[in-house]
Amino acid sequence: MEERKRKQFLLISIISKSLSDIDALKDLRELKALVETYGGEVADLIVQRREMHEKGNYMGKGKIYEAVNLIAQRKIDIIILNATVKTGQIYEMKSTFMISNKFIEVWDRVDLILQIFKMHAHTAEARLQIELAAMRHMGPRIYGMGMVLSKQAGGIGTRGVGETNTELMKRHWQELTKKVQGKLDKLVIVRKQQIDKRSRAGLITISCVGYTNAGKTSLFNLLTKKKKLIADALFVTLDSTVGKLYLPKMHREILVSDTIGFIKNLPTQLIDAFRSTLLEAINANLLLLIIDVADSEMSRKIETVENILSELNLQEKKRIYVFNKIDKVDSIDKVNITLRYQKHPLEFISVKTGEGIDSLLSTIEKELESINHNEEINNIYGL
Ligand SMILES: Nc1nc2c(ncn2[C@@H]2O[C@H](COP(=O)(O)OP(=O)(O)OP(=O)(O)O)[C@@H](O)[C@H]2O)c(=O)[nH]1
Ligand SMILES: [Mg+2]
């Protein structure tokens, strides 16, 4: 049987004049990885350097013409705008590209991430979180549609119909959002109860966090002997799972949780929608921040992860920096990395070969003991 043709993507990236060529390229590389994770193929690329204006078109006239031609030539199915793009602009582009008489999807970066999320959502919680994130993201666009209707209605002498539509859509959207949020809140309560119960039982939890594809689930599986899905793709894990790990020196069992990966420019509405999944990390006693040491983007990704952790108010949470995939690099400048990130305990491991795992376990024990010790002191002084 003939293999189903992969969807053809045209990437359009408007780059601010202040962004360096190297940074622009890195951005595009990540966008390409997202398209491939979705299962699509990048057929072509349009890049334009210009400043974005609040009201202006996303791209200049010349580039729009270029895009229209490419759509026909390359048989494009979906256009991706490398940005979070305003409501009206997406609609404008959609109608511009209709000229070529074929319906073309126009997505921005968030749409693409949400589509990938959708593919990987296996639990009710993950599905609800995505639904909510999508509704929040689409919200303004629904008003945009209302605006278009309003203009059309005005043109044929039925002024007012459009406005009514906008209001209706807005109300409908608000009601739907509330409903999904309500369902999610119920799940959050259950999860919170579970977390409370564990902490009352004196169970210690550590949580794997980090950039997507760093190896969080791989390490989680190794530590807990579970068999969660691992793949060389972005956003494979969307929900959090908890497993057990026995620490021999402490003579105790602790819990390990695996979480959703982060990515640059993850919009706040996505982080907010995924808060219930991230509760495991928020409530953990210790974080394992997993880093792909073979990634040329390593330091930028660490920065991104730290920023998102701050948004979750986790900047003060104790963490171990776990540099994973050491088997993939010929040599690592451990001294330099240690100097750079000396604020935290560091470990160098390979989940693949097992190197460094014993040392990581010792550090986990050491850190947990110091947290325990501090908690005991706090308890004694009633803090
Ligand atoms: N060479 C090598 N590859 C690894 C190692 N650890 C993980 N990988 C690979 O890295 C890829 C991503 O691993 P995952 O464990 O799915 O990564 P993740 O951080 O859970 O990713 P998301 O759930 O998508 O955020 C997979 O192809 C793994 O096989 C390692 O130590 N060495
Ligand atoms: Mg994972």
Image (cartoon, rainbow, N blue to C red):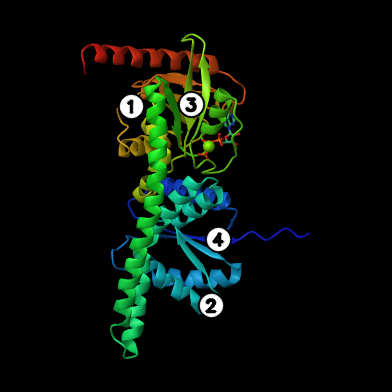
Which of discs 1 and 4 lies nearer the camera? The answer is: 1
Q: CA distance from mark 3 to mark 2?
A: 53 Å
Q: Earlier in the sequence, mark 3 or mark 2?
A: 2
Q: CA distance from mark 1 to mark 4?
A: 41 Å
Residue at 60% x, 20% y: name it: 354
Q: Amino acid at mark 4?
A: Phe
Q: Earlier in the sequence, mark 1 or mark 3?
A: 3
Along the horizontal axis of the image, is 72 left or right of 12? right
Q: CA distance from mark 1 to mark 3?
A: 16 Å
Which of discs 3 and 4 lies nearer the camera? The answer is: 3
Q: CA distance from mark 2 to mark 4?
A: 16 Å
Q: Earlier in the sequence, mark 2 or mark 1?
A: 2
- Label 1 neighbour load within 10 Å: few <14, some 14-19, many 20+: some
Which of discs 2 and 1 lies nearer the camera? The answer is: 1
Against 300, is 104 above or below? below
Q: Earlier in the sequence, mark 3 or mark 4?
A: 4
- Label 4 neighbour load within 10 Å: few <14, some 14-19, many 20+: many
Q: CA distance from mark 3 to mark 4?
A: 39 Å
Residue 382 on image: x %, y %: 21, 16
Residue at 35% x, 35% y: name it: 309
Residue at 32% x, 79% y: name it: 162
